[in-house]
Image: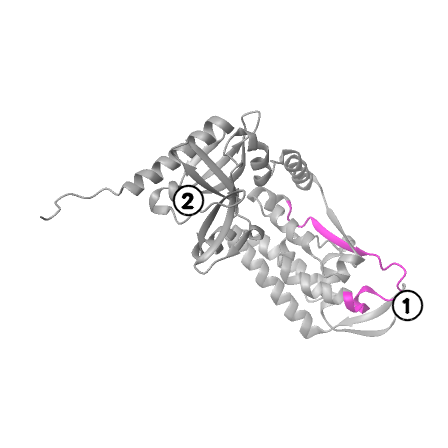
Amino acid sequence: MKHKFPKYNPNRLTAEKGVTLVKKLIENEFGWIFRPTPLEHDFGIDGYIDIVNDKNYITGKSIAIQIKTGSSYFNQSTSSGWKYNGEIKHLNYYLNVENPVLIVIVDLDKNKAFWTEFDTDRITSTQSGWTTNIDENQFLNKSHKNILQALSGFEIDYLPQLEHQWEMDKQMKESGLMLLGINKEEIIDLNFSGFETLLKRITSSDEMIKKCKGKISFVIFGYEEDQRELYQIEEVRKWAKKVLPAFKYWGYFLNMDEEISQMTGLTVLHLCSVDISILGPNPDKSGFLIEPDGKQSFTLMKELFNWLNEFSDKHKISESVNKERSNKIAKILGLGK
């Protein structure tokens, strides 16, 4: 006789009962939220537990959970509980999940669930996969609430940090000049993370971009006792060549007013990234008469122009502003009027 109807798999009902019991325990015992994974998206994680703190705020912390239901998961006893056998395919999956992973076995007859954290230090290999122990005293109930919350990590109030950042943004918008100090340690370590962070902040909105045009400059300190000029110090030259493409949009954001640009900002980047000929002592002031390599300076100018054009296209900077900034670049590099 041919079967004319779909056939229901009783194992599916058992699994669903297990998930239902776990959901009930999580919500009633812990006061947390259980989000089941849709069956078609279940590849080894049956759901996520969202942690709710004592003031009923959802913290953003979560725990992934794998649920196994039925008497077969209680067949292999150990001295302290039961042996859980896992499949190799789940190892990398669990290890790459960003949340802690719980393995839970459910005894429907006793209406109880037992858990262990998936931890590579607590698993051993078998011929067909791996195994870990689930302690018979690790009930999924409120007595383990603090332990499970600690697994997920306690929430952090980031608002004070953000409020400080927003206050700094306000000051950047209202200031006339932002002068950054680059210390010797940053130079030696080729560290320009401060510029990368700054670029994110000053390009965070159209308003910030507009307000920060031509406002930034920087000075390098820590070499005051060194008799050499900055462009003669190899580590400074290496740093300058590295930071140039990291920030890129110097032409738009750097202050290039003559009274500020003397050995700051673009002047430093220019002299430290091209070859320099020393013509002799400077008769009017300390230091030397120097001549930057013209061909290399022209190449640098074209690169700065390209970055400025890229920035202008991306953020719809007017042609007049682009031209004004280009003229300043050329003048600082000694290639314009």
Residue located at (68% from left, 42% from top): 172
The amino acid on which the numbered mark 2 sits, given as a three-letter code, is Tyr
Residue stretch rendered in magenta on the structure: 212-235
Asked whether residue 43 is drawn in magenta, I would say no
Residue located at (35% from left, 35% from top): 17
Callout 1: helix, strand or loop? loop
Q: Nearer the viewer, mark 2 or mark 1?
A: 2
Residue located at (62% from left, 36% from top): 156
- Residue ID for mark 2: 73
Q: Residue furthest left?
A: 1
Q: Is residue 290 visible?
A: yes
Q: Position of residue 67 (x, y in %)?
A: 42, 42
Q: Where residue 283 is drawn, which disc sits there?
A: 1
Callout 2: helix, strand or loop? helix
Asked whether residue 213 is drawn in magenta, I would say yes
Instruction: Give the image's coloring scheme.
Output: one colour
Q: Position of residue 264 (x, y in %)?
A: 77, 57
Q: Is residue 262 visible?
A: no
In front of the other: 144 or 206: 144
Instruction: Give the side of residue 230 with respect to residue 205, left or right.
Output: right
In the displayed structure, 131 sits above or below 74; it is below
Q: Where residue 26 is drawn, which disc sits there?
A: none
In the displayed structure, 35 sits above or below 191; it is above
